Amino acid sequence: EIGAVEFPGNILVKGDVLTGGSVTCRGNLTVEGNVNGGTVDAGIFLEVKGRVENDAIARSSGKMIVRKAMNASLTAREDLEIIDMAMDCMIVSGGSIKVKKTSGYIAGGEIVARNGLDTPFLGSPKTKQTSITLGGEGEIDHSDLATQAIRRIDNEMVRLNDQIRNLRVNPLDRYGKSNTWKLKSLEKRLFRLNQQRHEYEKRMQQDFGTGKGWTPRIL
């Protein structure tokens, strides 16, 4: 799905939520496909039966279940369950984070869980550093987390812009083949990151004007 969908009750998405797509509801939200670059936001419970990937954003003011997550942002006010794996994600839970599959894992990214983390495997030498924060009192400061996420996106965008400039200066690789496909891939990722950054800023402004003290809303 592409475009914005909002509903005061429950929503069932039988397909995918793609880049540029946004689905928000006050009740339970189930996505039977993937969230590929899009945004999903549930007031009570969120389940994604496919993958959350390509700079997608998934949020729930209650519990959340996803099958797989790669290069995505997951935020749940209560418990968050991952069926298979998560790689290079920002994952925040006001409850616990659990990976259900016995061969499942979390590798790379930033993990914040107030009530603990349960995963068969954690980290990998093949991914970026895995940062973990456990415990804490009171409300999770989502304003600070959103600011950190925006900072992380900005750093990634700077890196991508440098790579894009280099490819434009050197359109051929060391074997004399065109770098056009790589350039288009980087430009597409840069576009998705810019959308994700805008989504963080928009949500902060919607909740609390300046974004200070932002927390997930109970809808």
Image (tube, rainbow, N blue to C red):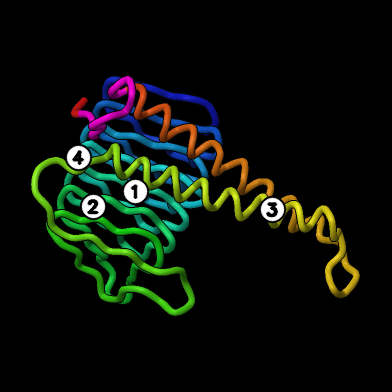
Label placed on residue 74:
1
User: At x 43% / y 24%, what residue is drawn?
Assistant: 5
Q: Which residue is mark 2?
A: 80
User: At x 29% / y 42%, what residue is drawn?
Assistant: 144
Give neighbour class at mark 2: few <14, some 14-19, many 20+ (Cα, 10 Å): many
The image quadrant where one finds the C terminus is top left
State if disc 1 and disc 2 touch (CB < 8 Å): yes
Label placed on residue 46:
none
Tell whether position 212 is magenta: yes
Q: Secondary structure at mark 2?
A: strand
Label placed on residue 62:
4
Q: CA distance from mark 4 to mark 3?
A: 35 Å
Secondary structure predominantly adopted by residues drawn in magenta? loop
Q: Residue 185: horizontal and vertical position, in percent?
A: 69, 53
Lower position in the chain sequence, tag 1 or tag 3: 1
212 or 52, nearer to the observer: 212
Q: Which residue is mark 3?
A: 185
Lower position in the chain sequence, tag 2 or tag 4: 4
Q: Residue 113: horizontal and vertical position, in percent?
A: 20, 56
Compared to 143, does 50 lie above or below? below
User: At x 34% / y 67%, what residue is drawn?
Assistant: 106
Q: Secondary structure at mark 1?
A: strand
